[in-house]
Each structure stands twice: as C-alpha cells, then as structure tokens.
C-alpha cells in the first residue's frame, strides 16, 4: 500500500507542475490513480472492521457496540 501512496504523490507533483495545461493526460492519470488508492484504503478498513467483528466475544461485545 505504501508503494501505491508513493505513486499517487509522485503523480500529484507532476500534475501540479503542469497545472496550467489542463489538457495534459497526467491530470487524468493522477485522478484515476487517486481514486484507486482511496478504494484500496476503504477496502482495507472494511476488511479490518469485519475481522474485528468476527473476533468479538462476550467480554468485548461492548467495545464493538
């Protein structure tokens, strides 16, 4: 996941340098990569939450509540 973050940041810098040229394909590439990275984060959060809920027992049910 950290490599994807690095890629998004690298594309952000390149897109910022070319901010006056709105037709440059780097802007689209940055947007697509950024959305994919956000989706990866959301999927990881959801997976972690579901694993936590599966591990809930009688002693930790109020923590989950």
Image: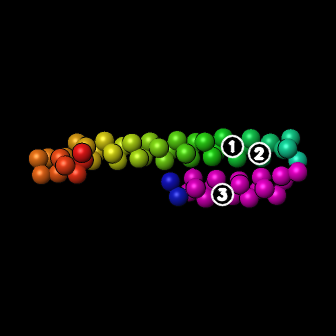
Label 3, on which residue?
A: 9
Percent coordinates x, y for residue 45 in the rendering: 41, 47
Residue 31's disc number: 1
Q: Residue at x 49, y 47 (%)?
A: 41
Q: CA distance from mark 2 to mark 1?
A: 6 Å
Figure quadrant of residue 36: top right
Pointer 2 residue: 27
Q: Give residue 50's position: percent from left, percent from top.
A: 31, 41
* Disc 2, SS: helix
Numbered disc 3: secondary structure: helix
Residues packed near mark 3 inside 10 Å, few (<14), some (14 to 19) or many (20 plus):
some
Tell me the magenta residue range. 3-20
**Residue 8: x, y in percent?**
64, 53
Query: Left of 7 or right of it: where is 58?
Result: left
Q: Is residue 29 left or right of residue 60?
A: right
Disc 3 from disc 2: Cα separation: 13 Å
């Amino acid at each position: 996941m950290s490599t994807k973050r690095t890629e998004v940041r690298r594309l952000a810098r390149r897109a910022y340098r070319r901010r006056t040229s709105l037709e440059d394909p780097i802007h689209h590439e940055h947007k697509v990569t950024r959305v994919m990275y956000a989706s990866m984060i959301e999927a990881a959060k959801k997976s972690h939450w579901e694993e936590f809920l599966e591990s809930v027992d009688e002693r930790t049910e109020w923590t989950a509540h």
